[in-house]
Image: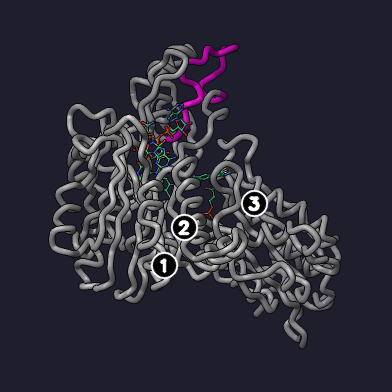
Amino acid sequence: MSTVPIIPESAPFSSEQRSWLNGFLAGILSRGAAGTLPSINSNATDKPKLLVLFGSQSGNAEGYSKKLCKEANARGFQARVAGLESIQPEELQTENNVLLITSTWGEGDMPDNAISFWDKLNQNGSSPKLDGLKFSVLALGDMNYGDTFCLAGRKLDQRFEELGAQRIHPRVDCDVDYDELAKTWSDGVFLSLLNTTGNHDETTNSSVVVEKEIETGYTRKNPFPAPLIECVALNAERSAKDTRHVAFSLEGSGLIYETGDALGLLPENCPEVVANIIAAHELDADAIVHIHNGSEAPLKEALKKHYEIRSLIGKSPETKVSPTDFINSLRKLQPRLYSIASSLKAHPNEVHLCVGAVRYEKDSIQHKGVASTFLADRLAKGKTAGVFIHTAKHFRIPANGKTPIIMVGPGTGIAPFRAFLEERKITGATGNNWLFFGDQKRSTDFLYHDQVLNWVKDGHLTRLDTAFSRDQTEKVYVQDRMLSAASELWSWLEQGSYFYVCGDASRMAKDVDAALHTIVQQQGGKSEDDASAYVNEMKKSKRYARDVY
Ligand SMILES: Cc1cc2nc3c(=O)[nH]c(=O)nc-3n(C[C@H](O)[C@H](O)[C@H](O)COP(=O)(O)OP(=O)(O)OC[C@H]3O[C@@H](n4cnc5c(N)ncnc54)[C@H](O)[C@@H]3O)c2cc1C
Ligand SMILES: NC(=O)c1ccc[n+]([C@@H]2O[C@H](COP(=O)([O-])OP(=O)(O)OC[C@H]3O[C@@H](n4cnc5c(N)ncnc54)[C@H](OP(=O)(O)O)[C@@H]3O)[C@@H](O)[C@H]2O)c1
Ligand SMILES: Cc1cc2nc3c(=O)[nH]c(=O)nc-3n(C[C@H](O)[C@H](O)[C@H](O)COP(=O)(O)O)c2cc1C
């Protein structure tokens, strides 16, 4: 289906350039409506094959890949989309065109579903030659990670080239707001593909209309102002921790979540911190500034609600700048994600979180986390905060309620498991449930202890293993409890149990992963490689899922 071209035939462009520009401009003009896009000749009998591969942990790369695949099909490709966990590197030898979209996790690591693919791509002696494959990489990341910014995408891009694949469009590295840059990349990629496949109709306007998905309801870009119902301390008074049970009302929002999903929250900076920064930079707090969203506001409001100011704390300005230049030098304040700690079936119209307040001292300055202390200290009951649902398809309870589950969730990592247990209780799921929980001290830090112990009492929680790290001289962690229960844990795994981990990514999740490998190796009588293959197979079949941060 063709549409009215924007660049007229009389313009000094070749038909190909005109067609491309028409598509490109229509795409820009029609944000929210339909886009006219250059495409494969609709009469072509052999539609070019295109494989869109994603490495994704929390769903961004996966969601974008699926949209891109739809768009590619509308442009006349024979496109399919797949996660990197479902493909072997040698299978790429039968492909012509691959678009690879990946995020980066941990400290420059591959997302979980890409680890096995990456390892195989680097196996000495057995990595496949990829001559003849055309590819391009879109890397998603976060510039706050510095040197590891988009590292997974950068590594894959380089490795594909080393293996002989031909890059048809340069890699693009995206920061957290990736929409615009990703669109520029995909436009460039499609133009290159159309040029190289040779099927592009040069004589007619072969553009197609691709319906742009119109986001309805409340989303990241249009968050719901959710009233705070309660924010209750979960630690006893003498605790060194400050963990909160936070409940928001979703009444009237139409928002629906599944257990395993996260809640996106738009925080506000602390007004005191804002005032200190304005004073240090000798700025006028009431000066009106233009905000990135197109509106205007006094500087103090703009800094409170719209910009990241953490990096400015304690820094003396080198030169004096105008309020506008000051604002323009800052990054947008990003939403924070929190694993949802409730089942919607158990708490209709509500969403619960388990939030650890971040407070620490550095260079003799007391710092506080923006979002966690916005919730813990500044948001009053009944007042609203902008929220949206961040879908986590990789982190779901088994569809079959009879399937056993093992959950490892120390500290705030307990959040999604409270939700899983509530959901499995209310739906009458009969599968066995095993929880590993840990924190500093039993007397002060046993989060949700009443609810958890009641589940033990009534048999809903088949087994509970706790690791209170500071109740004895030697540290005891959840992975120590796993190793002590190795034989039973192995027998659950052999019965098809799912294995979930949530909480700290930098230390705990790595140590728990190592303990899991040890258990599989020792209890299953396997070699190290066979144990890795077993664990990889669990990941591939989505029986090993992680929600780590
Ligand atoms: C999928 C997902 C689920 C999550 N679920 C939860 C959850 O259920 N509960 C929960 O509490 N959090 C959860 N988080 C983490 C949460 O999103 C925030 O990152 C966390 O609350 C901190 O945000 P903040 O705005 O309070 O802190 P920020 O203002 O973002 O400050 C945090 C930064 O401060 C610095 N920092 C922190 N501690 C120290 C220290 N001791 N020394 C030096 N620097 C330090 C680090 O640079 C850190 O990145 C989750 C994250 C993800 C991605
Ligand atoms: N700085 C803060 O105040 C703060 C607040 C909230 C969240 N966070 C961050 O958010 C994440 C989760 O924090 P949280 O408060 O929920 O819990 P956490 O800090 O992960 O602590 C929970 C339990 O895990 C233990 N632990 C420490 N290292 C471990 C390891 N290698 N393996 C297994 N267990 C280990 C802790 O013991 P020990 O502490 O005794 O070693 C504690 O008993 C972490 O990344 C944390 O850094 C930080
Ligand atoms: C725990 C954690 C670790 C991350 N580590 C990195 C990193 O090392 N480098 C980077 O560029 N981005 C990093 N990111 C940002 C993600 O790559 C980014 O949010 C991306 O959009 C996530 O896409 P996904 O949902 O497809 O996994 C990290 C994010 C989280 C929550």
Residue type, label 3: Ala
In which quadrant of the rendered view does residue 126 lie?
bottom right
Spot occupied by residue 83 in the image (x, y as percentages of width and height): 58, 66
Residue type, label 1: Leu
16 lies above or below 263: below
Side of 83 where 268 appears, left or right: left
415 lies above or below 85: above
Q: Which residue is mark 2?
A: 519
Q: Which residue is mark 3?
A: 139
The answer to whether mark 2 is within 8 Å of ligand 2 is no
Query: Which mark lies nearer to you, 3 or 1?
Result: 1
Q: Which residue is mark 1?
A: 493
The majority secondary structure of the magenta stretch comes to loop
Q: Residue at x 59, y 72 (%)?
A: 70
Q: Earlier in the sequence, mark 3 or mark 2?
A: 3
Side of 383 where 501 appears, left or right: right
Side of 88 where 267 appears, left or right: left
The answer to whether mark 3 is within 8 Å of ligand 3 is yes
